[in-house]
Amino acid sequence: MRLIQVDAFTGKPFAGNPAAVCMLLDGERDAAWMQDVAAEMNLSETAFISRRDDGFDLRWFTPSIEVDLCGHATLASAHVLWEEKEARAEDAITFHTRSGPLICHLRTDRIEMDFPARPVEETDPPEGMIEALGVEPMSVWRSEVSYLVELASEEEVQRASPDFGALGAIPDAWACITSMSGTSGFDFVSRFFGPQAGINEDPVTGSAHCALADFWSKKSGRTDFRAYQCSTRGGVVHVAIDGDRIRLGGQAVTVFRGELRA
């Protein structure tokens, strides 16, 4: 099987979010084997693709758990299928996942993905989360899978230095911090922390933008954004609300190809 590493949500290597893509699975492979491969790769996500009559099955694993939705590894998977000629550039790719069908299109300047929206509601943070993040929130919101913490400025987002041990001890306290962008060309910035899943800080988190889109639409009345995730590697995410779906767009770059022999 081919094992290909792709930097997603970036147009240059060694930026964005790296994902490993394992394709195409040669028959049934159990979750324990996939988890072992993901732990071996030690990236925020490893994607596993198998072909079916109406598209492809797609699963995502962090080094420690399987997740229900992942943006950057989906982007990487679509990029690889087109680049490896497993799908025609003029055809959309349908991935069948734990979050339902996800459809990807190859546009002129990016790959565009159709994802489910994750609406947010304002809430109180769980005990200890704000202290673990080390921030002063303007507001705290909750989606079905994570907390979203609004900060006053991009500088505060960049300066945040969470206590990952303390944050990881709070069940389900995956946390995204965000603010309006102070950089020309971007509407908002964010960072995402998930030590509970074995990822202290995710470089670029496509799925988090399914909640960020709803939050920033509530704040601004807009439905279309260009966002920057200001991790050390950094990445650009195009976000648009389309009813109860989110269109996520970004670029991807292949870094290396190998052969999985285990």
Image (cartoon, rainbow, N blue to C red):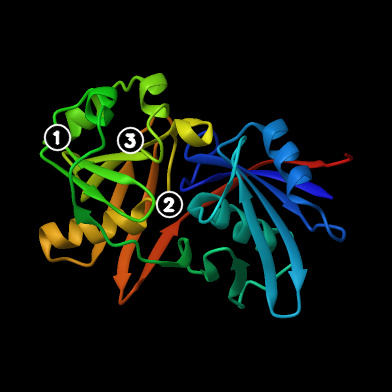
- Which disc is residue 137 wearing? 1
Q: Amino acid at mark 3?
A: Cys
Residue 151 is left or right of residue 28, and the answer is left
Q: Are marks 1 and 2 in contact (CB under 8 Å)?
A: no
Q: Amino acid at mark 1?
A: Pro
User: Separation of disc 1 and disc 2 at Cα?
Assistant: 23 Å
Percent coordinates x, y for residue 186 in the rendering: 24, 48
Percent coordinates x, y for residue 76 in the rendering: 59, 52
- In the displayed structure, 52 sits above or below 218; it is below
Q: Residue at label 3?
A: 230
Q: Residues within 10 Å of mark 1 (few under 14, many from 20)?
A: some
- Which disc is residue 122 wearing? none
- In the displayed structure, 145 sits above or below 222; it is above
Q: Residue at label 2?
A: 206
User: Separation of disc 2 and disc 3 at Cα?
Assistant: 13 Å
Callout 1: SS: loop
Percent coordinates x, y for residue 247 in the rendering: 39, 67
Residue shown at the point (71%, 59%) measured from the top left: 49
Q: Residues within 10 Å of mark 3 (few under 14, many from 20)?
A: many
Residue shown at the point (33%, 39%) measured from the top left: 175
Residue 198 is left or right of residue 137, and the answer is right
> Mark 1 or mark 2, which has the lower sequence index?
1
Residue shown at the point (87%, 61%) measured from the top left: 27
Residue 24 is left or right of residue 187, and the answer is right
The answer to which image quadrant residue 200 occupies is top left
Q: Residues within 10 Å of mark 2 (few under 14, many from 20)?
A: many
The answer to which image quadrant residue 171 occupies is top left
Q: Nearer the viewer, residue 92 or 215?
A: 215
User: Separation of disc 3 and disc 1 at Cα?
Assistant: 18 Å
